[in-house]
Amino acid sequence: MTKQDIDSIASLLDKCPLTQESNVKAHWRDVQIKVLKEDWDTETARLRVSDEGKPCIYVYPVLAKMTPDYRAFCVLREFGDYLLTKTPEETELMWRQKLTLPTTEQIDAFQQRLNQGFKSYTEVVESLKSPIDRLIAAHLSNAMMANGQAFAGATNINLREWGPTSEFATLRRYYSLTPLTSAYCPRCVDKDFGSAFASCVVYDLKTVLHTQVKDALREIIKRIITAAV
């Protein structure tokens, strides 16, 4: 890997809206990149952090045969893993469970449908078009049914004030996006933060098969790298 290759990767970080934070650029400057003399198994690049906390990304010769984008992806995958190590412990849980918050619009969509002539919670959920909207509606429906609220009387419920739904409906309780990332994302993007980060910077998450899921995943990645200190 040449200096030109490394500069090209740095330019991707400069162009990506997600990586404009000064902490990301500072961490990138801390990383040393070394090219190894021999390939090993199927490895392309590997992060190592010394006992003193100094990060180094070792690049295997085979990477020189790959496309520029894939070379960047492999290096940034390791850099993404390094960023994750610089976040608070609870941030890793946020990634594993893909924790995110509903939006006001999504809560309103469910609230309004309680008064629009639907005959069951299932009908309300199925009336929503996007997978995230349906997932949030399912969470609200389950909370209401679990607390004995029949659909026939749901028209009188204010989601933001009713105890079992108030925390979620006022955007103070996270939910897991995992059911959707596992369905709409490649396995590596769903499971590995470094791969998700690199895919975001290099490919703009083009392999995520639904726009709303892509946007929600991008926000999770943004929160994590912002927390890297």
Image (cartoon, grey):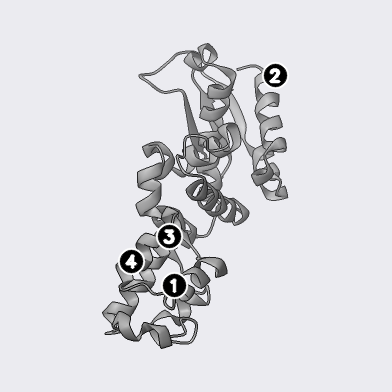
Task: Give the spatial CA distance, label 1 vs label 2.
Answer: 56 Å
Q: Which residue is mark 1?
A: 113
Q: Which residue is mark 3?
A: 128
Residue 25 in the image: x percent, y percent?
70, 42
- Between circles 1 and 2, the one closer to the viewer is 1
Is residue 98 visible to the viewer in this orientation of the structure?
Answer: no
Work out whether 74 lies above or below 112: above
Quote the CA–CA distance across marks 4 and 3: 9 Å
- Residue reaching furthest front? 117
Q: Residues within 10 Å of mark 2 (few under 14, many from 20)?
A: few
Q: On screen, 122 above or below 111?
A: above
Asked if disc 3 and disc 1 are in contact, CB closer than 8 Å, the reply is: yes
Residue marked by disc 4: 123
Q: Which residue is mark 2?
A: 4
Name the residue located 56 percent from the left edge and 39 percent from the top edge: 200
Residue 148 on image: x %, y %:
27, 85
Residue type at mark 2 is Gln
Q: Residue at x 62, y 36 (%)?
A: 31
Residue 164, picture quadrant? bottom left
Name the amino acid type tagged 3. Leu
